[in-house]
Amino acid sequence: MKNLNILTRAFTAISLILLTSCTMGQTQNSKPTESDADKIIGAWRSAARDSEMEIYKSGNLYYAKMLAGWGNDMYESDGKTLAKDNKNPDAKLRNRPLLNLVFITDINYKNGAYTGGKLYLAKDGEMLKCDMKFEGEKLTMKWYSDNQLFGPTKKIWSRIK
């Protein structure tokens, strides 16, 4: 009986040690690391299939350029001439084409989220704040203005390469 008590206590102690070790290991491995940050790099298509972007890194920040988007709004009415950034508040930039336009800038990675970015909406010539995060394999992007009356707009992206 005494030996059974000792075995039960030993088994309980070993079980607790193993459980604690496993839990600590999971916590450490599941926390996002800076090396996870680059998984955002690549080409993405919106869930609505109305735009595509390429995200790349420069220094410690991430940027995105427009590969395709807004249906026929990427081209003039002839369907061949690239549409220009004609709503840009800076008159010097109004002749640049929308195709390959860098429209997301200064995204920073911290604690599993991409924050502090700026999103340029060429349709309106407006600059907004932009944050991104992964939800499974999908990339969720939210953009918003300083005006808190208007909530964020959300767009979901899937990797295409």
Image (cartoon, rainbow, N blue to C red):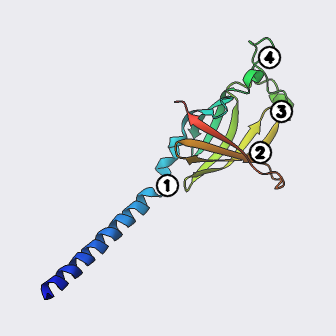
Q: How crowded is mark 4: few (under 14 residues within 10 Å), some or many (20 or more)?
A: few
- Amino acid, disc 2: Leu
Q: Which residue is drawn at 74% across and 27% down?
A: 70
Is residue 91 or residue 65 the one in the foreground? 65
**Label 2 SS:** strand
Q: Where 102 falls versus 6 (above or below)? A: above
Q: Where 24 falls versus 50 (above or below)? A: below
Mark with earlier residue (3, 2): 3
- Amino acid, disc 4: Glu
Q: Do the residues labelled 1 and 2 touch (CB within 8 Å)?
A: no
State the residue position of label 4.
76
Q: Residue at x 65, y 32 (%)?
A: 65
Residue 48 spot, x, y in % from top left: 67, 32
Mark with earlier residue (1, 2): 1
State the residue position of label 1.
32
State the residue position of label 2.
128
Residue 82 spot, x, y in % from top left: 75, 18
Horizontally, residue 13 falls left or right of residue 130, namely left
- The answer to which image quadrant residue 153 occupies is top right
- Amino acid, disc 3: Asn
Mark with earlier residue (1, 4): 1
Q: Are marks 3 and 1 in contact (CB under 8 Å)?
A: no
Is residue 61 or residue 24 the one in the foreground? 24
**Label 4 SS:** loop
Horizontally, residue 52 falls left or right of residue 19, namely right
Q: Residue at x 66, y 44 (%)?
A: 141
